[in-house]
Every structure is written in structure tokens, then in C-alpha cells.
Amino acid sequence: MCLDGHCAHTYDPLVPEAASDDAPTAGPGRRRLLTAGVAGAAALTLAPVSFAQASEASPAGGKPPTSGEVTHVISGFLETGVADFVYLPVEVPKGVQQIAVSYSYDKPGVPAGTPGNSCDIGIFDERGTALGGRGFRGWSGGSRTSFAISNSDATPGYLPGPVNAGTWNIILGPYQVAPQGMNYQVQVTLTYGKPGPDHVKNFPPQRAKGRGRSWYRGDCHLHTVHSDGKRLPDQVAAGARAAGLDFIVSTDHNTPSSHAVWGQYAGQDLLIMTGEEVTTRNGHWLALGLPAGEWIDWRYRSRDDAFERFSRQVHRGGGLVVPAHMYCAYVASQWKFGFDDADATEVWTGPWTYDDEHAISTWDQKLGEAVRTGKRWLPAMGNSDAHSEPQVIGLPHNVVHADDLATDSIMDGIRAGRSWIAESSSVELTFTASGNGKQAGIGEKLSVPADAPVDIRLDVEGVPNGTVRFITDEGQMHQESVSAAGTGTVVWRTTASLAAYVRAEVRHPMPNGSPGQGNTMGDALLFGPMAALTNPVFLERKGR
């Protein structure tokens, strides 16, 4: 029955068609499944939801209606141990101007320490759900309970464009399911009518007015309302300018929807680059410097052998692959994919914590492995991962030596390790190694006779009473404090036979006023929070 062009139907893909809305929740034996499995992470596809009933409102001849709405309510139940992703196919007829979706799920009480229900949502259009395919139309994770897509507009996180006829797939991501299981309800509303005008994209330019070959500051891990952030894009851009940054990278979770709005907020003083935080079930990684509008799939685990494929996709576009916050304690955030396909790794994320201390240790081990085997070394990065107030944009950020303030130049500088990490723009440093009449800087190699003296020098500003640490493949080899004014120069002499690389840290004093002391494993916790961290200078024994 239809009233004023609005049809409401209830459909449960997990119970027999004859079941009423008041029927009890279906158990596992009553499922009606179309397929199980999509290339990549384990997936479950349920029976399709048809909007054929809308023909009741169609004029004679079977033509689609020109106005009005049709709604279906889809109810179901998911057990613990369900697949990573559950697809709800929706048969969309011709003549639809907008598709709108809302959802909810129950959150029963669970004992302390037991995961409760958490479920993400997104959608693929009629082009399908193939891994890395063209059908992706949006993802909001768990940050929204509803979204809408039309040709002219879409909810942040989703991509505007035609609502074509065919099988669309709503995707649920039940990443935590309580022992009692999860009851969910999804409401789908189709609005009929002529499509609006095409959405106008405003991608940011790939170059800003720089200073030629110079050091540029930028935060490469930032979120907006287009994923789970609370800041609007204009607020992120304003925060970056206030932090004294020259560039930022937009990295909303699993969607490129914000790419098309950044153009109006970029300027000659701020380069805005497009990217994505690829949020898998085995860790998160940053796809930096993506071609505007490009999407990187995230529906796989480390055992699925898909990470290499999507790393190649990023590299083909000139971008970088960067594992993010590898020891984050949140569910599915610990890094499991290894570093063979990475271009750099994030070792400092937001305000300094023990997670970062652990990440620095892992990175340093990888440096030792690189000099031992002669393989490529992995540069370090630091980013804020800022989502909302009071999280500080630019705490920390990267200071990159690049040929220009342009996307390709910044990516080249990060890839080469010509960068250091600062907690704020008030921190300045230079770090060099000099010997045998030559000099090398951060990310560079100094080739000298094995026993020729090499002077390691760090000049620092902006860290009152800071502690400077020089660390080699042997461990910490020198420590010295700077003045209460925060300015100082530290010089230490070594040789290429004693040190394969040297990197520097500048630490704040401990909260009790102690600068920290010693270099044993037990004393490592005595050092205060990081203020600055450099990538290494490598010392090569000449003639080897």
C-alpha cells in the first residue's frame, strides 16, 4: 500500500520471507545467503533486497515514478565470529535520484574487559564489490548513523554521482561482536526524480609558492568530518597555518571524499596533498600523495596477500606507503604487514607516549638491519593524527628538505629520509657529520676512511633544558644538555669504523626536573618526552 508516493516495507535477510516484523531474531540455521567471500578479507553476502514493490506506484506501462520515496527496513542478526564484512545487496530500479541509508544495532551489556558491539558502514554501487574495483561509493566507519548519495551531493565520507539502476551493496563492518551477538537494522530510502546537476570537484593544486630548495614543515596524518574527525576541512587548514606548517596531507579513513573540497582551502602559503588512512583489520597505513580522487581498498588482512598489490597502486601514482602508529592499542591497529613495501614508517604519533618509545625502538632495529644487510633503510616520520579539539595539528610534524613546495618534491624528500621530526614550529635544529673535508646532512651518506675522525654536530633551538642524545648502531653514545634558554650546540667525535650511522634525539626534561641519565635499557624510561628526532646520517668506510 502506498500513500503520497511513499512506500514502506520491512525485510529481514536472515529470516524466511514469510516471517513477520514481530518474529523472533533468526538463528544461524535460518540464514539465506547468496555467496560467502569476496577477494580479500572474509566476507558474507546476504540475500538481495528488492525495490520491485515500487512498481505499485509506477504509471501504466511500467515506467518508473518521477517523484516520491520508497523505504525498506532490513533487520538481521550477526553472531560472534562473523566475517569481517557483511554485504546487504539492494536492487535499485531506474529513475532513482537519491539513495539514503540509516542504521542501528544493539549494544547489550558485557562483562568488564569483554568487547561489546561495534559496527561500521559503507556502500558500493552497481559496479560491484570487487577488491580494488570501481564500485566504491563511500565509507563512514562507525562515525555516522546515516548517509545519503545523489548526483549533486553526498554526506561527507561518500562520493556524489549517479544513482544508477542495478545491485548496490551496503557493507557492514562488525569489527567487535558481543557474546550475545548483534541485532542490526538498516533502513534504505530511494527518492525518485530527475538527477541534479553534476557535483563540482575542487581538487587542491600540486604546488604552492615555496622557497626553492629548502626545509618545509608538514603534518601528514590528519582527519576531518569526512571520516571520524570533528573538524571541517577549513578548520584543519586554519589549524595548519596557525601551527606554522607549509604543507599537510589529508588522510581520512578509507575514503577519498574530502579530496574534492580541499582546493578552496589551499593557497600559495599552504600545500594540501591528498591521501588516505587505509584502515585494515591488521593495522593502519598512510597512502600519501595520492592522485586526487583515488581510492585505496582496505578490505584485507595480512594473510590475504593483498597489501603488496595496493602498495603498488600507491607507488604507481607517485605516492608513499607509511605504516601508522604501529603499536596503537586500539582494536585492529597493530601493524602486521611488515615493512618490505613501506617507504617510511610513522614512529611518533600525537603527544609522546610509550607506544612511540616502542616504535622508535623497532625503527632503530630496522636501521641496524639495513646497514648489516646493505638493504634499503626506512625513514622515520612523525604526525599528529589529529581528529578534533584539543588534539593539536602539527604535534608532531615533519621538517622535509625538498627542492620545492610541491607534491612530488615533498614526497621525494620524505622517501629519501631528508627529514626530521619536530613537536612544534618553535623547535629548530641542524644535524651534520663532517670528516675528511666532506660534510653530510640528515638522510645522507658520508664516505670517509675507516679511522678518519668524524665530527657529529647538532645545533638546536626551542627546547629549554633539553637533553641531546646521539645514537648509533651500537646504541646511545653521547648525551648532553642544553641551556635553560633552549639553545645549544653539541659536538661529538667518532669514526666510520665505530658508527655505521648516527641519529639525534632532543628530549624534554623529566617532569620532576631531572634531565635523564644513563643509556641502559632500564634507564631508557628516565628520558623525558621527545621534542625532536632526526633521521640518521650514514658513515661509510671508504674503500670497502
Image (spheres, rainbow, N blue to C red):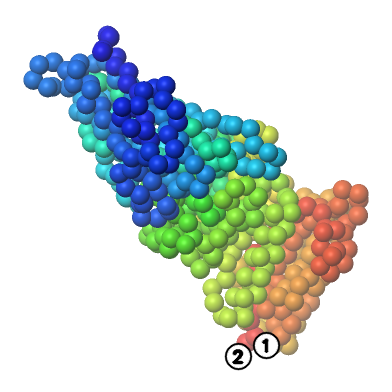
Observer-nearest residue: 406 or 308?
308
Q: Amino acid at mark 1?
A: Pro
Using the rendered view, name the quadrant where residue 370 is placed.
bottom right
Residue 422: in sight, yes or no? yes
> Could you tell me residue 528's position as x and y percent?
82, 54
> Callout 2: helix, strand or loop?
loop
> Callout 1: helix, strand or loop?
loop
Observer-nearest residue: 191 or 428?
191
Residue lying farthest to the left in this orientation:
61
Report the residue at 71% width, 85% height from top: 497
Using the rendered view, name the quadrant where residue 69 is placed.
top left
Q: How many marks?
A: 2
Classify 438 as above or below 284: below
> Could you tell me residue 68's position as x and y percent?
27, 15
Q: Decide if residue 305 is on the left or right side of residue 199.
A: right
Tag of residue 449: 1
Report the residue at 87% width, 67% height from top: 518
Report the residue at 91% width, 50% height from top: 513
Which quadrant holds the N terminus? top left
Which quadrant holds the C terminus? bottom right
Mark 2 to mark 1: distance in Å? Answer: 7 Å
Report the residue at 49% width, 32% height from top: 183
The residue where tag 2 is placed is 543
Q: Decide if residue 172 is on the left or right side of residue 201.
A: right
Observer-nearest residue: 38 or 243?
38
